[in-house]
């Protein structure tokens, strides 16, 4: 008998009385002013946010937010401030040293500041290795909480996806919060 | 004296450090409270999460098979390991097949449980911990003292010293930002040079075959971004039925663990990326036995958030190394006893039965109640302390005979006036580290008889 079959046999042998699946009998957290709440919670997560006004150019905002940036990587149409198309790189290691990555978020979650990022570039390394991350997000795509997030139609349609809430952080030395553990040191969400 | 009490003696000898440790943990506990209070439906959320876990573990084989089927269809390789040894062998086989030499790891309690790192190192595979706290502990050569905050017992100066030696940081610089960024720089090279990536699994979604890994540092995602092989290891209890169930746990996990609304990165791995192999190792290692143990089956609901550890007054004041099992605190006391009562019964005394752990657990595990049950089992398992048994026998005799009880109280009054060396000596384990309370001038019985009680 394989280990798999042995384990499954043991589980069946030791099985407890089947419990029915519970119904959620509560009203989850909702917010009345989505954009305001999202900007507030992004700040809690350590991220910046910018409301893109009509006629404003995203590229200008990116340049203004990260004036020192030399390498800006993006495969998004319209991001002409990009200096590198990350999809043309064979090896993800070549992304080391990227100053800013510009990517697209699918939707944001109001209760915790997460933005759902689906793999959209050849190498997912881009989301983590660049010093700063700029996430473009449609301000109409905001959900209240995780229940709504996972219930979005087509959510399961991804190979790799990540909820990102602000910059990389750690408090492993004496509980002192430090921004920039391994991933982006700065995250800016541009709400279009 | 229990193994916990003996080890704790060393920790509490440094009073300042004990107070510092206590406060550091309580700070995390308070953050958790603020998060819980910010979610009006918190208690209902816990209740549903707990019942969803019960539903899942009562259909564990069904959901694991569903997960396996879907993960396989997604292109992942699923392996099953009966015990720690088989888990280690499977992992090593995969590494060997790819000629791997450098493994980059994100934090996994399961790998600690299985002793994976020493196993691999004996076989010439370097396993580098990429979580900062775990890396600090790896440099120091000691195990983590907490399941979520591995280096919570270490002071910044000590981190500075070990980084000075390992990473050649500036002598005497113990600024957390400076040290963290030094580790960032050094580990960046480990990420880029690794040939095998390993992560744990926080949740495995049966309906989709995806698994979720939560970190604040982004180390799991950095780790899996370069090597051609990703090995994810999971205890069987990590499976959740579907995304609706997952929503409950993602909401609870970070709020309970570190008092954040969410972790920075909540990564969903479903299909291997182009050119990469993805392996998932599902590990039993005693979990199917827990399922067959009605008094302790609830332990399979654990999310490994560590909130029971943060709130535990005994843990906060005695530190992780006072426990003989590798997981400390209320969760560790219970899991240790399930692993081996013979080896780990020395921890069950490390509990005041205050029940704070049961009250913060996001899956509503009856942690304190189970510790109490284990204590009742010590005598039948022949693990009870003979000294305590003797005292309890004596107490029983006194309690059953009122005349003896009252003379004992009188004797106690007299004893109070005896010199310290009579009251506090090595024959009296209770008196070590404790002070006798003052006797009340009158007993309740005397007051009642005099009509003083209205």
Image (cartoon, coloured by chain):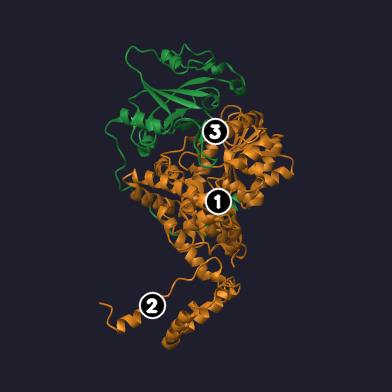
Marks 1 and 3: CB-CB under 8 Å?
no
* Comes first in the chain, label 1 or label 3: 1
Residue at 54% across, 70% down: B431
Between residue B145 and residue B24, name the one nearer to us. B24
Question: Alpha carbon of mark 1 to alpha carbon of mark 2: how far?
Answer: 38 Å
Find disc 3 in the rendering and name its residue: B177
Q: Are marks 1 and 2 on the same chain?
A: yes
Question: Alpha carbon of mark 1 to alpha carbon of mark 3: how far?
Answer: 22 Å
Residue at 51% across, 22% down: A121
Vertical placement of residue B443 versus A75, above or below:
below
Name the chain under label 3.
B
Dot 2: within a 10 Å radius of its alpha carbon, few (fewer than 14), some, or many (20 or more) residues?
few
Q: Colour of chain B?
A: orange
Find disc 1 in the rendering and name its residue: B17
Under tag 1, what secondary structure? helix
Name the chain under label 1.
B
Quadrant including the N terminus of chain B: bottom right
A77 vs B183, left or right, is left
Marks 1 and 2: CB-CB under 8 Å?
no
Name the residue furthest left.
Answer: B454
Under tag 2, what secondary structure? loop
Quadrant including the C terminus of chain B: bottom left
Under tag 3, what secondary structure? helix
Vertical placement of residue B304 versus A139, above or below:
below
From the top left corner, tell me how far across and down residue B3 is, in percent: 60, 63
Q: Colour of chain A?
A: green
Question: What numbered label is drawn on residue B441?
Answer: 2
From the top left corner, tell me how far across and down residue A66 is, in percent: 47, 18
Between residue B17 and residue A66, name the one nearer to us. B17
Question: Alpha carbon of mark 2 to alpha carbon of mark 3: how far?
Answer: 58 Å
Name the chain under label 2.
B
From the top left corner, tell me how far across and down residue A31 is, in percent: 29, 35
């Amino acid at each position: 008998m394989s280990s798999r079959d042995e384990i499954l046999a043991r589980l069946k042998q030791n099985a407890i009385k089947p419990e029915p699946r519970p119904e959620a009998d509560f009203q989850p957290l909702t917010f009345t002013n989505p954009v305001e709440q999202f900007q507030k919670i992004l700040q809690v997560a350590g991220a910046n946010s910018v409301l893109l006004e009509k006629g404003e150019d995203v590229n200008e905002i990116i340049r203004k937010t990260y004036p020192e940036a030399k390498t800006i990587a993006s495969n998004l149409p319209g991001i002409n401030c990009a200096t590198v198309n990350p999809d043309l790189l064979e090896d993800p290691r070549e992304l080391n040293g990227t100053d800013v990555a510009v990517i697209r978020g699918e939707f944001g979650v109001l209760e915790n500041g997460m933005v759902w990022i689906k793999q959209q570039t050849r190498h997912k390394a881009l989301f983590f290795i660049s010093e700063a991350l700029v996430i473009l997000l449609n301000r109409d795509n905001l959900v209240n909480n995780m229940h709504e997030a996972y219930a979005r139609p087509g959510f399961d349609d991804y190979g790799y996806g990540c909820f990102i809430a602000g910059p990389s952080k750690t408090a492993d030395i004496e509980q002192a919060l430090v921004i920039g553990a391994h991933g982006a040191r700065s995250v800016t969400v541009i709400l279009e | 004296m229990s193994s916990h009490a003996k080890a704790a003696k060393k920790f509490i000898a440094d009073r300042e450090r004990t107070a510092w440790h206590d406060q550091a943990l309580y700070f995390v506990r308070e953050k958790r409270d603020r998060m819980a209070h910010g979610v009006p439906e918190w208690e209902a959320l816990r209740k549903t999460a707990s019942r969803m876990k019960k539903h899942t573990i009562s259909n564990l084989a069904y959901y694991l098979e569903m997960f396996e089927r879907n993960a396989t269809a997604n292109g992942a390789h699923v392996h099953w390991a009966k015990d720690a040894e088989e888990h280690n062998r499977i992992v090593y086989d995969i590494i060997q097949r790819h000629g791997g030499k450098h493994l980059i790891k994100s934090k996994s309690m399961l790998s600690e449980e299985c002793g994976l790192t020493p196993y691999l190192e004996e076989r010439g595979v370097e396993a580098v911990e990429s979580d900062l706290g775990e890396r600090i502990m790896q440099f120091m050569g000691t195990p983590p003292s907490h399941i979520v905050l591995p280096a919570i017992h270490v002071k910044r100066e000590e981190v500075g010293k070990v980084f000075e030696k390992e990473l050649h940081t500036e002598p005497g610089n113990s600024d957390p930002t400076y040290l963290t960024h030094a580790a960032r720089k050094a580990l960046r090279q480990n990420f880029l040079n690794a040939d095998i990536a390993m992560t744990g699994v926080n949740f495995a979604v049966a309906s989709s075959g995806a698994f979720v890994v939560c970190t604040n540092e982004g180390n799991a995602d950095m780790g899996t971004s370069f090597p051609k092989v990703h090995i994810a290891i999971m205890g069987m209890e990590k499976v959740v039925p579907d995304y609706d169930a997952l929503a409950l746990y993602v909401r609870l996990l970070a709020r309970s663990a570190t008092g954040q609304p969410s972790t920075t990165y909540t990564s969903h791995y479903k299909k291997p990326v182009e050119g990469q192999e993805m392996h998932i190792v599902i590990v039993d290692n005693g979990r199917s036995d827990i399922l067959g143990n009605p008094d302790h089956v609830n332990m399979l609901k654990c999310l490994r958030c560590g909130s029971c550890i943060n709130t535990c007054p005994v843990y906060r004041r005695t530190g992780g190394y006072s426990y003989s099992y590798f997981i400390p605190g209320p969760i560790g006391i219970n899991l240790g006893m399930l692993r081996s009562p013979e080896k780990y019964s020395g921890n069950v005394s490390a509990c005041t039965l205050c029940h704070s752990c049961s009250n913060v657990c996001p899956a509503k595990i009856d942690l304190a109640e189970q510790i109490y049950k284990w204590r009742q089992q010590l005598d039948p398992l022949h693990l009870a302390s003979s000294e305590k048994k003797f005292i309890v026998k004596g107490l029983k005799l006194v309690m059953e005979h009122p005349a003896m009880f009252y003379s004992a109280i009188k004797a106690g009054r007299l004893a109070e006036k005896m010199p310290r060396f009579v009251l506090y000596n090595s024959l009296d384990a209770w008196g070590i580290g404790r002070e006798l309370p003052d006797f009340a001038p009158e007993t309740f019985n005397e007051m009642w008889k005099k009509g003083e009680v209205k």
